[in-house]
Image (cartoon, helix red, strand yellow):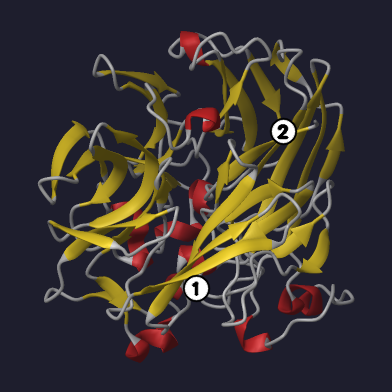
Amino acid sequence: MNRYVLGNFAPVTEEITAFDLPVTGKIPDDLDGRYLRIGPNPLGLEDASAHIWTLGEGMVHGVRLRDGRAEWYRNRWVRSASVADRLGEPRRGQVADERLDFAPNVQVAGHGGRLYALIEGGLAPYELTDELDTVGPAALGATEQGFSANAHSKYDHATGELHSLAFRYGADFVQHIVIGPDGRNRSVTDIKAPTLPYMHDFALTEHYVVFYESPMVFMPERLATGVPFGWNRELPSRLGLLPRAGGTVRWFETAPVMVGHTLNAFDDDGTVVVDVVVHPRPIDFADVGASKPVLERWTVDLAADRATRSLLHDRPQDFPRLNGRFGGKPYRYGYSAAAELYATPSATEPDRPDEGFSSALLKHDLLTGVTEAHEFGRDASAGETVFVPSARAAAEDDGYNLVYVHDRDRGAADLVILASQDFTGEPLARVHLPARVPLGLHGSWIPAA
């Protein structure tokens, strides 16, 4: 049986709107905004045994917090043309090429007062309303060469700009796109990538754009599978540094590994420090949970012209996040989800265990080397956490960690709010949602202001 259609990987089949959600504990009064997360949620499964989890149509799940209350919960499919057609609804806007149209499922992010669902590989973003309804395809980051803002776009708090490293299936170059607060492109830089690498994430420092080439490359012969990537053992892995002020890329060879996600990067007295989640072996997109990624620090010595690796923590983990105000700067704290597949016998169907992914969040103190774990228990599964600074923001970790956690007893999710400075303590609040939130991908906190 395909584990990615079981337990909390299984898609939900209904869109729900609920108001005045019940809460255990107390929601901090300074949380005023929306916690949103997106992920694959296939609209019907024709062949569950062959289903690839990452190829499900995107669904956004959101909770509105204000004045110590949880005002609403909503979940909505992104209405790509095909989703709207299958739901019997009018299409939202025009798509340039229906072959490249898909409901984004990787990242949901705000920029310039607008909300976007993002994907990768040259597929278009979609704009959403504040209530998560679909406006239509968006031109965010669109370039003359057919690229657009990619998933894992990075917001620069210093400039108000949104940076994107965009790749397109089959193209032998990628583009670094800088989008101003008004939503218009400020600059577009082409970067040669003749091996056609899968560039899922990147990093920013004050002076550099940091990106990664790995042996995971585009393979046209695999297009029919829906995941046209494979591992080319003949290729090395490389880290590239593109000066933000302009100039040529400097390349540094590393061991043949794949960088999944970036925690952060910063410049440090002649070096560039990059903290990344690394997959030491080829990842199988049909079974992404089988990988055992770990957190590493890569240090680039600019004078010596070399990059070195060191292990920060060996517990399998993914979806790293930090206090966004420290993005691209020296920092102390990072957060991630333990990446550990497990199966727990189901009370109702003993032969079909509940499948879970993570039952813990991790807080890394990169100054002391101490890692704390908030364990939710074997019957829970948690996704990516988002850090939200408190209104007083007296220290880097002065704030809250928000995360959806599956409550197996209720068969539904809680939005759990932790005090980041009391990471292993009891949650400040649990917002009890009326529906299950399947394990998904990336989320954002969208402040009301």
Q: Earlier in the sequence, mark 2 or mark 1?
A: 1
* Viewer-side residue, 192 vs 170: 192
Depicted 315 relative to depicted 205: above or below: above
Identify the amino acid type marked 2. Answer: Leu
Q: Position of residue 434 (x, y in %)?
A: 75, 36
> Disc 2 versus disc 1: distance between alpha carbons?
33 Å
Quadrant housing residue 419 = top right
295 lies left or right of 393: left
Depicted 211 relative to depicted 309: above or below: below
Depicted 377 relative to depicted 115: above or below: above
Q: Quadrant of the C terminus?
A: top right
Identify the amino acid type marked 1. Answer: Gly
Depicted 65 relative to depicted 184: above or below: above
Cβ atoms under marks 2 and 1 closer than 8 Å: no
Q: Secondary structure at mark 1?
A: loop
For disc 2, the marked residue is 433
Q: Position of residue 385 (x, y in %)?
A: 52, 33
Q: Position of residue 427 (x, y in %)?
A: 56, 14
How many residues crowd around disc 2 within 10 Å: few (fewer than 14), some, or many (20 or more)? many
For disc 1, the marked residue is 121
Q: Secondary structure at mark 2?
A: loop
Q: How many marks?
A: 2
* Residue farthest to the bottom, as pictured: 221
Residue 129 visible at all: yes
* Viewer-side residue, 380 vs 448: 448
Residue at 81% x, 61% y is 134
68 lies left or right of 253: right
Residue 361 visible at all: no
